[in-house]
Image (tube, helix red, strand yellow):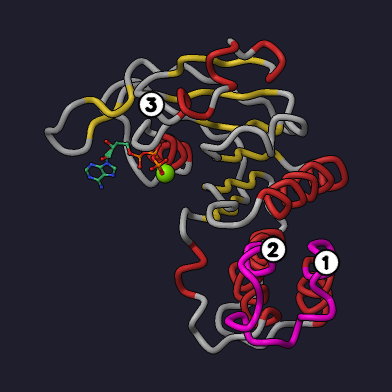
């Protein structure tokens, strides 16, 4: 498929991509390369200008880029995660026992048990990101789509987040699309990297990436 915003130039050209159920795919590429746009197309939030997109998963969870921007809201970790459960719970009703259990489990999975009742705004950036991932997990998704969840956190937090996702992928059998424009952190954990720069310029195992792409200065060029 190809895509343009309004009557603007093509932002994605002749993209052909097939993701199997249960894959963990990293999507990387420079700023403005079209990564976020690609995710939004996959999720049905944008329509392709030509071509088509087929989505077999029904339960989707999307962690948009800069989702943490709203952390000033006076909510606790548990309340945030419960909001992720809400689409599956009764509309506006109180959470049932099973839902509360799912919320607790999601919080435990990301290792925030001891912070569960703290205000989100009092957590570190890396902890906040884990809280948002727990929110996504609480929806029990078949497809988990994360747009640069590691922006602005240190390398150590990036790597521990990538390791956490790899573990979730293994244990929960969830399909993951993970956008990051920094390699390093995810390379060791994924079996497949798709590089997007207006089109798909690479699709394969991290080990087969052309050497030039390992150099961050080129990845951002
Ligand atoms: N709502 C919009 N309207 C018009 N153009 C847009 C819109 N959103 C994105 N674009 C343009 O589409 C192109 C791809 O943007 P996109 O956000 O998908 O890139 P990205 O790879 O996610 O970049 P980043 O790494 O900075 O997040 C860019 O040239 C951008 O300016
Ligand atoms: Mg983006």
Q: Can the viewer see residue 88 in this picture?
A: no
Relative to 105, is 152 above or below?
above
Q: Residue at x 79, y 62 (%)?
A: 110
Give the secondary structure at mark 1: loop
Which residue is label 2 attached to? 130
Which region is colored magenta?
107-130
Graded by Cα atoms within 10 Å as few (under 14), some (14 to 19) or many (20 or more), the crowding at tag 3 reads few
Of callouts 3 and 1, the N-terminal one: 1
- The numbered mark, 2 or 3, whose residue comes first in the sequence reads 2
State how far apart marks 3 and 1 are (Cα).
36 Å
The alpha-carbon separation of the residues under discs 2 and 3 comes to 30 Å
Q: Residue furthest right?
A: 171
Q: Is mark 1 within 8 Å of ligand 2?
A: no
Magenta stretch contains residue 116: yes
Q: Position of residue 191 (x, y in %)?
A: 74, 24
Q: Which mark is residue 221?
A: 3
Q: Nearer the viewer, mark 2 or mark 3?
A: 3
Answer left or right for 103 relative to 218.
Answer: right
Quarter of the N terminus within the rendering: top left
- Mark 1 — residue? 111
């Amino acid at each position: 498929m190809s895509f343009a915003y309004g009557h603007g130039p093509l932002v994605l050209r002749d993209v052909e991509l097939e993701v199997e159920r249960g894959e963990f795919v990293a999507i990387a590429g420079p700023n403005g390369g079209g990564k976020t746009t690609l995710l939004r197309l996959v999720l049905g939030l944008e329509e392709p200008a030509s071509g088509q997109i087929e989505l077999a998963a029904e339960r989707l969870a999307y962690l948009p880029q800069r989702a943490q921007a709203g952390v000033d809201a006076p909510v606790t970790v548990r309340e945030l995660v419960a909001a992720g459960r809400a689409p599956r719970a009764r509309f506006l009703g109180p959470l049932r026992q099973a839902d509360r259990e799912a919320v607790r489990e999601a919080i435990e999975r990301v290792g925030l048990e001891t912070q569960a009742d703290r205000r989100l705004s009092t957590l570190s950036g890396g902890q906040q990101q884990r809280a948002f991932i727990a929110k996504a997990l609480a929806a029990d998704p078949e497809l988990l789509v994360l747009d640069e969840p590691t922006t602005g956190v240190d390398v150590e937090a990036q790597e521990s987040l990538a390791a956490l996702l790899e573990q979730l992928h293994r244990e929960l059998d969830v399909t993951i699309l993970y956008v990051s424009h920094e390699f390093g952190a995810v390379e060791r954990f994924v079996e497949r990297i798709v590089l997007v720069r207006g089109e798909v310029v690479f699709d394969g195992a991290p080990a087969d990436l052309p050497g030039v792409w390992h150099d961050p200065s080129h990845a951002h060029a």
